[in-house]
Image: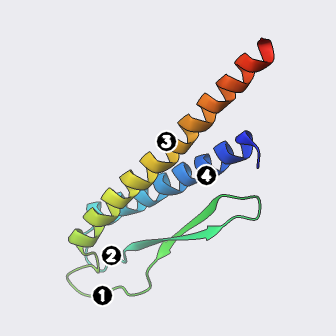
């Protein structure tokens, strides 16, 4: 696997975590909205490598005064998004460092 492929995969992971973060933020913002159906984020592997992400309503909306958003679960999701993004960013930075080393060897 090439360095650029690894960096591309880590970039898709960062984008997936960004999407998850946005969905969780929407859920928190709408937690008190009557009949709001929380958004769920689903991941799948991409044919080119990396992660494909989709966001859709959970389909378990409660009709009436409240929503089906559990704020504790959303906070956990926010923390998991942060950690996932940091892990992918670390892979990206390592790939960039390796690329720099290869370029310096090539110049010498």
Which of pointers 3 and 2 indicates the residue nearer the eye? 3
Of residue 27 and residue 6, the one placed in the foreground of this image is 6
Work out whether mark 2 precedes mark 1 in sequence or the reverse, and give the earlier one. Answer: 2
Q: Is disc 4 surrounded by few (<14), some (14 to 19) or many (20+) residues within 10 Å?
A: some
Dot 3 and dot 1 residues touching (CB under 8 Å)? no
Does dot 2 land on a helix, a strand or a loop? loop
Residue 77: x and y, percent? 34, 64
Work out whether mark 3 precedes mark 1 in sequence or the reverse, and give the earlier one. Answer: 1
Q: Which residue is mark 2?
A: 36
Using the numbered discs, state the Cα–Cα distance from disc 4 to disc 2 in whole angstroms: 29 Å
Dot 4 and dot 3 residues touching (CB under 8 Å)? no
Q: Which residue is mark 1?
A: 62
15 shown above or below 55: above
Does dot 4 land on a helix, a strand or a loop? helix
Does dot 1 land on a helix, a strand or a loop? loop
Of residue 22 and residue 1, the one placed in the foreground of this image is 1
Identity of the residue furthest to the top in this view: 108
Left or right: 2, with 81 as reference point:
right
Residue lying at 65% horizontally and 51% vertically, measured from the top left = 9
Q: Which mark is residue 12?
A: 4
Q: Which residue is mark 3?
A: 90
Work out whether mark 3 precedes mark 2 in sequence or the reverse, and give the earlier one. Answer: 2
Residue lying at 47% horizontally and 52% vertically, measured from the top left = 18
């Amino acid at each position: 696997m090439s360095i650029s492929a690894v960096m591309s995969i880590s970039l898709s992971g960062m984008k997936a975590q960004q999407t998850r973060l946005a969905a969780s933020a929407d859920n928190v913002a709408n937690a008190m909205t009557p009949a709001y159906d929380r958004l769920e984020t689903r991941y799948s592997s991409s044919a080119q490598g990396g992660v494909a992400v989709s966001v859709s309503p959970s389909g378990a909306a409660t009709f009436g005064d409240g929503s089906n958003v559990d704020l504790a679960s959303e906070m956990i999701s926010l923390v998991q998004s942060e950690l996932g993004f940091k892990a992918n960013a670390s892979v990206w930075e390592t790939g960039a460092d390796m690329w720099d080393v290869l370029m310096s060897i090539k110049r010498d």
